[in-house]
Image: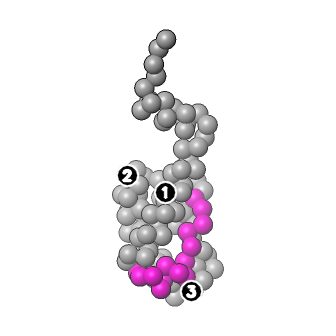
Amino acid sequence: MSFIDLKNLLPQSLTRNRIKPQIEATNVLEETKKLIEQVWGPEVAQLVEPKYVKERILYIHCNSSTAANALSLAKKKIVEEVNKACQEELIKDIVFWQ
C-alpha cells in the first residue's frame, strides 16, 4: 500500500476539479471588502459590494456615485493591495458600476 502526501493531493484535486479559480475569486472578494473597510471606513464599505471576478477583472457594484468615484481614483492601489493580500496576481483591473 502506498501513501499519498496530502500536501500534494489537495492542490492537484483543486486544479483537476476546477475549484481553485472559485476559491481564488472568493479570496479576492473577501480581501477587497476588508481593504475598502480598512481604508475608507465602514460607511463606504456599506455602499459597495464586490460581486465577482471574471477573466481577472474584479466587478464591484456601488450604491453611490461618490463611493464609486473615490474607489476608481484608487483603482491601481486596490489591485496591488488585493493581489498582495492573496499572495499572487489574481486581478488586473476593476470595473465599478451602479
Residue at image location 58% in from the left, 53% down from the top: 55
What are the residue bounds of the magenta stretch? 40-53
Amino acid at dot 3: Ser
Looking at the image, is 51 positioned above or below residue 42?
above
Query: 45 or 91, which is in the foreground?
Result: 45
Could one spot residue 93 in this view of the protein? no
Query: 93 or 8, which is in the foreground?
Result: 8
Residue at the extreme front of the image, as rendered: 1
Between marks 2 and 1, how big is the CA–CA gap? 10 Å
Q: Check disc 3 and report the residue beneath it.
A: 65
Amino acid at dot 1: Asn
The circle on residue 10 is none
Query: Which numbered mark, 2 or 3, is in the foreground of this view?
Result: 2
The circle on residue 27 is 1
Q: State yes or no: residue 7 in magenta.
A: no
Amino acid at dot 2: Gln
Q: Check disc 2 and report the residue beneath it.
A: 87
Could one spot residue 10 in this view of the protein? yes
Quadrant for residue 75, please give it.
bottom left
